[in-house]
Amino acid sequence: MYPLLDTIHGPEDLKRLSRGELLRLVDEIRQRLLEVVSTNGGHLASNLGSAELAVALHYVFDSPHDQIIWDVGHQAYPHKLLTGRHERFHTVRQYQGISGFCRREESPHDIFNAGHAGTSISAGLGIAEARDQLGQDFHVVMVIGDGALTAGMAWEAMSNAGALQKNKFIVILNDNEMSISPNVGAISEHLNRIITGQVYNTMRHETERLIKQIPGVGRLMNKAAERIEEVVKGALVPGRIFEDLKFRYFGPINGHNLPLVLDTLKNVKQLDGPLLLHVATKKGMGYKIAEADAVTYHGPSPFDIETGSFKPSSGPPKYTNIFADSLIRLAQDDPRIVAITAAMASGTGLDKFAKVFPKRYFDVGIAEQHAVTFAAGMATQGLKPVCAIYSTFLQRAYDQVIHDVCLMRLPVTFVLDRAGLVGEDGATHHGIFDMTYLRPLPGMVIMAPKDENELQHLLKTALDYPGPAALRLPRGAAEGVDMDAEIEAIPLGQGEVLRHGDDLTVVALGAMVYPALQAAEIVQDEGIDVTVINPRFVKPLDDKLILHHGRRTQALLTVEDHVGHGGFGSAVLEVLADHEATDITVLRHALPDDIIEHGAQNLLRRDFGLDAAGIADKMRQLYAMRHRQDATSFK
């Protein structure tokens, strides 16, 4: 089915292919991408666009001796196919399969783990410095997309790289948004061939050498020549900003013209650095449906290749849609509400808000630090900013949350989408640290709804609170409960008892509430009577409610889809310690102190005992612990 791709077991196999065969290999890569992503879901459009670039890089450079670093990983599927993972590629993003992102643990060709944008140039510069310190000799090549280049960290790294002036240091800007018209493209390709060609560079350096040898005036003439060159470059050559950062800039070139990309890389490889090659590619290239709608097919769920239609989904709406609808309703009554996201409009549901309130919606790009402080600035003037950012991405703006929001007690609402286990995106995307890093912050309120109806009420609670608040939303479908017609704030820190029992008290947070209720029904048939509390709030906790039922049953189980260290269970233990509730047997059920890999949410919850069956096991364990203690006390 894949006559060429089947023979590629590593980059060394590419080098025996003719250019005609390389072109056919690119087509096979795209076919393989469509075959697998249409079945598994995953990142599609950007990977379709990077096929020629991946082939050219592995053809010209010698990976893993030459170190190629792919930023984020959204464009690295072709790289995986060319580095020994073609036979396992059908497992990408699947449980116990290969990752959708670069993983050092997976292949020696994956130089640096990534899943968050903007890290490649910093990592590459560190690698280049280590190379020079250790007296080694290899190229460092970083592939970064135009979207990732909106991250401030990328520019910090370029500023540093320009100062250090590393050789064999090449940044590839894979620009998959730029459209180059034919005439401009032809001029750009012509300029690129002149600038990167060996004849030009040989003549340039030889001329410099000869001028410097002229007695008395050589150095002055050379300085004048340099000034003239800079003026001409600024007028004729794009990318002046990169030149000002002391990168030699080449491009833009057509990233789908494989012979051109190959020749350009070969020429650039011979030059001293740092260098930046600007490559223009098209998202969805080779699949017309994705070319026409690159946003939808950036990270699609399974779909039909022929029609592009997605497999029908049944059941309740997603939490992101409920959040967006609720925010729109609240914003209709309060003109002070504004919404901010960091390049995650559809992922957070705010694309719906943008259609209704385009002037009150802001997508700041992959710039989470700016997003938070931008929101803080708005809050100082009386607006009510809602900053919707994935839980894992808010980590990138931790200082801004502390310094620019919490220390001024500003009313910024953080909606942490994809809190908890996210599934197939894996370790870099699980939102399992937010409670630990937000709980210590002064004045911060942290909430987690058990279902979509509670979500709308807690959103209003956050917006009514005159300080910072965070609302954790799980990934995926909601519970399918009825929605109240009116949205009302819930009293701050007020939990609720959902089920009464005399043997154990279970305090389950957010997405763990309904599995805990199911588990209580399971053990009820075994004679274990369980009280189930929905705390709603992580901070402030409903101390009185938890203490009352904990002391009544003398056995308390906490359940959370978050790491145990510093999480919800830790908060409950702090309450018990503060009130000297030493008579309560406590068991915390949380995620372990380990890296959580990718896989479907239901499978991961099963593995970590966060489904109904696993929680029921913890209930049995606590019940046995309590009865052993009772027996010991009796003796």
Image: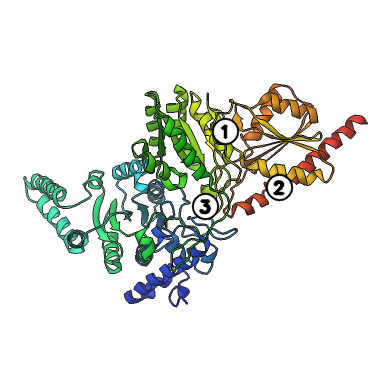
Where residue 286 sits in the image (x, y, percent)? 36, 67
Q: Is residue 120 visible to us here? A: yes
Q: Does 331 appear above or below 89? A: above
Give how far apart the Cα atoms at labels 3 and 2 are.
24 Å
Q: Earlier in the sequence, mark 2 or mark 1?
A: 1
Q: Position of residue 155 (x, y in %)?
A: 33, 42
Looking at the image, which residue is at 50% across and 40% down?
Answer: 323
Nearest to the observer: residue 418 or residue 265: 418
Q: Reply above or below: 261 against 125.
A: below
Q: Which structural element holds mark 2?
A: helix
- The answer to whether 304 appears left or right of 525 in the picture is left
* Above or below, comparing residue 293 to residue 116 in the picture: below
Which residue of the protein is positioned furthest toward the right in this rendering? 635
Which residue is label 3 attached to?
A: 425
Q: Is label 3 or label 2 in front?
A: 2
Q: Which residue is mark 1?
A: 447
Q: Which residue is mark 2?
A: 612
Say what secondary structure mark 1 lies in.
Answer: strand
